Image (cartoon, helix red, strand yellow):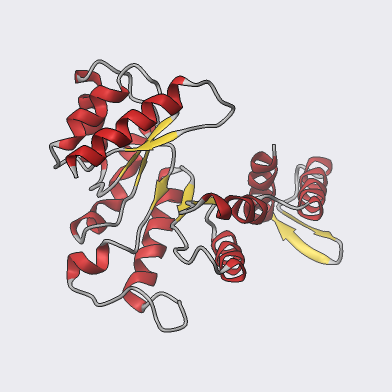
C-alpha cells in the first residue's frame, strides 16, 4: 500500500507539472493518517487548484489542514471536505460557516459511513438511499447552503448505468446541489450537462430579473401568468451567476 501511494504521488506530480487547461483538485489522505504528511510534502510546490479532504470533521479539521499545508511549506488552496464519512462528523456540519474562506464547497459520501456505523448498505434494492442516509444527504446539502458554499452531490458508483446517472444528476440539481463528484471520466459529460442551465432556464431567469428591475418597488408581480416574488428573484440571480 505504501508503494502504491508513492506511485500515486509521483503520477500527480507529473500531472500538475504539465500545464493543462484543467482545474485539478487532489484528494489527500485523512488527517489522522501518517500518509498525509507525505502527501503535503509532495504537493507543497505544485499548487493544485484545490484539495479534497476525506473524513472531514467540521471546521477544526479545515483549520488543521491549512496549518499542516503551511508547515509543509505550501499555501493551502481551497478545500472540498467530504463531510459525512463518520458518525461524529454529522454533528459538526454546522461549523463549516466558520471557515468559508478556506472552502471550495461541501460534499458528502455514502460509501464509508455505513461501515462506520455497522449498516449493511446505504441503499434500497432500487438504488434509492435508505432513510438514515437520505437524511445525511439532506444535512450536507443544507450545511453547504448555510455556509454559503457550493453543495456538491456525491458519486454515482454504477459507471455503466448512464440512464441512472442522468436521473441521479437531475434529482441532485432539483434538490439544490450545484455540482457533483464523478467516479469515472465517462460520467463527466452527463454531469456537466445536467448541472448546466438550459437556454430556456436562462431566458426565464433573465425575464424575472428584468421584471423586478422594471418594478423595483414591488415585492411580488405577475409574469407569464404566474405570481413571482423576491425568492424567485434570488433564485433567478443564482442561476444566472452559475451560467456565467
- Between 118 and 218, the one lying in front of the other is 118
- Between 209 and 49, the one lying in front of the other is 49
Is the C terminus in the top left, top right, bottom left or bottom right quadrant? Answer: top right
Residue 214 in the image, given as x and y percentages of width and height: 84, 42
Q: Would you identify the image quadrant in which residue 133 lies?
A: bottom left
Q: Is residue 48 visible?
A: no
Residue 191 in the image, given as x and y percentages of width and height: 59, 54
Q: Would you identify the image quadrant in which residue 21 lies?
A: top right
Residue drawn at 57 percent across, 67 percent down: 171
Q: Would you identify the image quadrant in which residue 238 lies?
A: top right
The answer to whether 69 is drawn above or below residue 141 in the figure is above
Residue 190 in the image, given as x and y percentages of width and height: 63, 56
Residue drawn at 49 percent across, 52 percent down: 182
Residue drawn at 74 percent across, 59 percent down: 228
In the image, is 127 to the left or to the right of 168? left
Residue drawn at 76 percent across, 54 percent down: 201
Residue 163 in the image, given as x and y percentages of width and height: 62, 70
Q: Is residue 206 visible?
A: yes
Amino acid at each position: 500500500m505504501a508503494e502504491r501511494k508513492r506511485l500515486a504521488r509521483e503520477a500527480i506530480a507529473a500531472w500538475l507539472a504539465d500545464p493543462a487547461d484543467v482545474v485539478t483538485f487532489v484528494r489527500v489522505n485523512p488527517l489522522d493518517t501518517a500518509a498525509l504528511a507525505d502527501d503535503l510534502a509532495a504537493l507543497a510546490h505544485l499548487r493544485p487548484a484545490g484539495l479534497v479532504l476525506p473524513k472531514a470533521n467540521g471546521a477544526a479539521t479545515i483549520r488543521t489542514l491549512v496549518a499542516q499545508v503551511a508547515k509543509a511549506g505550501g499555501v493551502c488552496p481551497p478545500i472540498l471536505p467530504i463531510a459525512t464519512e463518520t458518525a461524529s462528523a454529522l454533528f459538526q456540519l454546522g461549523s463549516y460557516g466558520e471557515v468559508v474562506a478556506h472552502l471550495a464547497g461541501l460534499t458528502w459520501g455514502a460509501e464509508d459511513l455505513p461501515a462506520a456505523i455497522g449498516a449493511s448498505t446505504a441503499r434500497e434494492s432500487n438504488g434509492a438511499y435508505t432513510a438514515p442516509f437520505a437524511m445525511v444527504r439532506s444535512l450536507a446539502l443544507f450545511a453547504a447552503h448555510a455556509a454559503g458554499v457550493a453543495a456538491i452531490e456525491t458519486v454515482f458508483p454504477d459507471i455503466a448505468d448512464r440512464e441512472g446517472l442522468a436521473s441521479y444528476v437531475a434529482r441532485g440539481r432539483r434538490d439544490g446541489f450545484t455540482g457533483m463528484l464523478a467516479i469515472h471520466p465517462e460520467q463527466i459529460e452527463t454531469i456537466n450537462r445536467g448541472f448546466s442551465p438550459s437556454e430556456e432556464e436562462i431566458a426565464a431567469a433573465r425575464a424575472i430579473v428584468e421584471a423586478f428591475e422594471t418594478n423595483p418597488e414591488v415585492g411580488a408581480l405577475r409574469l407569464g401568468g404566474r405570481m413571482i416574488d423576491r425568492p424567485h428573484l434570488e433564485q433567478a440571480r443564482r442561476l444566472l451567476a452559475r451560467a456565467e
